Image (spheres, rainbow, N blue to C red):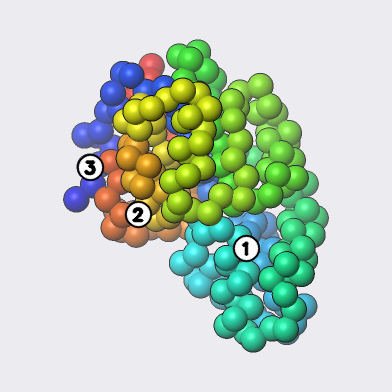
């Protein structure tokens, strides 16, 4: 069983923390739905198909192109995955302008980590245009050390590439933080510490099933670890 917050304390030699964005560090709700669900639903509504929010929740953290491919197959839509992905990104682009609220405490945490010379990496399944717009909206440009786009979780390769970039060879010097099972599986595939947060759409029980090192209410719970 995964350890709970109170029993987990990261080692004092942590050099890098990788944060998911939507639902972990960024509040991404549009009309009561997570941003990706909102854009996927609009995409398939153009073909008179209704995407259930519960189905999207099961795919939380999945590569967005793969999500589109899954629904294309389910609904037997003739358009190519590439065409659907372009349409999806148009809906994202229209909505992202209003994504300007962080998960409470994120900037404070980033600033604290920066003061400790810990590298801050953010990753997302969204493309670079969307991610960079969110970073500008939140004024995080000077806090983030590296950004990963269109991540195909739970592949470990993106995090491993960033580790190589920063000359980090030992994965136990890295923490992965996210709000989905796939976030946790990604971190475990790297061999780093894994933290689940409850600010997304997946429950404590769902996150615990992936056996992270801790499940906490939000990234604010990490502040005490680095004071």
The residues tagged by marks 1 and 2 sit, at their Cα atoms, a distance apart of 23 Å
Q: How many marks?
A: 3
Give the image quarter of residue 175: top left
Residue 207: assigned label: 2
Q: Is residue 192 left or right of residue 142?
A: left
Mark toward the viewer: 1 or 2: 1
Q: Nearer the viewer, residue 32 or 2?
A: 2
Residue position for label 3: 3
Label 3 element class: loop
Q: Is residue 201 above or below residue 178?
A: below
Give the residue drawn at x 51%, y 72%: 55
Q: Quadrant of the C terminus?
A: top left
Give the image quarter of residue 195: top left
Residue position for label 1: 65
Decide: few, some or many residues near mark 1? Use Cα within 10 Å; few <14, some 14-19, many ≥20: some
Decide: few, some or many residues near mark 3? Use Cα within 10 Å; few <14, some 14-19, many ≥20: some
Mark toward the viewer: 3 or 1: 1
In percent of width and height, residue 226 lies at: 38, 20
Q: Is residue 11 left or right of residue 36?
A: left
Q: Does the CB distance between marks 3 and 1 fall below 8 Å? A: no
In percent of width and height, residue 202 lies at: 43, 58
Label 2 element class: helix
In percent of width and height, residue 218 lies at: 43, 40
């Amino acid at each position: 069983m995964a350890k709970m917050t109170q029993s987990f304390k990261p080692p004092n030699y942590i050099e890098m923390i990788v944060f998911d964005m939507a639902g972990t560090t960024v509040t991404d709700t549009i009309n009561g739905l997570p941003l990706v669900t909102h854009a996927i639903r609009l995409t398939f509504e153009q073909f008179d198909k209704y995407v259930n929010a519960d189905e999207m929740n099961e795919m939380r953290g999945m590569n967005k192109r793969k999500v589109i491919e899954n629904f294309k197959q389910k609904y037997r839509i003739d358009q190519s995955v590439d065409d659907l992905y372009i349409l999806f990104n148009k809906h994202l682009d229209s909505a992202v302008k209003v994504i300007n609220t962080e998960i409470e405490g994120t900037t404070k945490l980033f600033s604290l980590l920066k003061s400790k010379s810990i590298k801050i990496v953010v990753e997302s399944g969204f493309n670079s245009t969307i991610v960079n717009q969110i970073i500008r909206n939140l004024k995080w440009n000077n806090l983030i050390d590296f950004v990963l786009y269109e991540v195909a979780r739970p592949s470990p390769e993106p995090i491993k590439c960033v580790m190589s970039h920063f000359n980090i060879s030992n994965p136990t010097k890295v923490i992965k933080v996210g709000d989905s099972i796939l976030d946790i599986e990604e971190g475990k595939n790297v061999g780093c510490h894994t933290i689940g947060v409850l600010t997304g759409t997946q429950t404590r029980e769902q996150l615990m099933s992936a056996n992270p090192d801790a499940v906490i209410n939000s990234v604010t719970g990490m502040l005490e670890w680095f004071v």
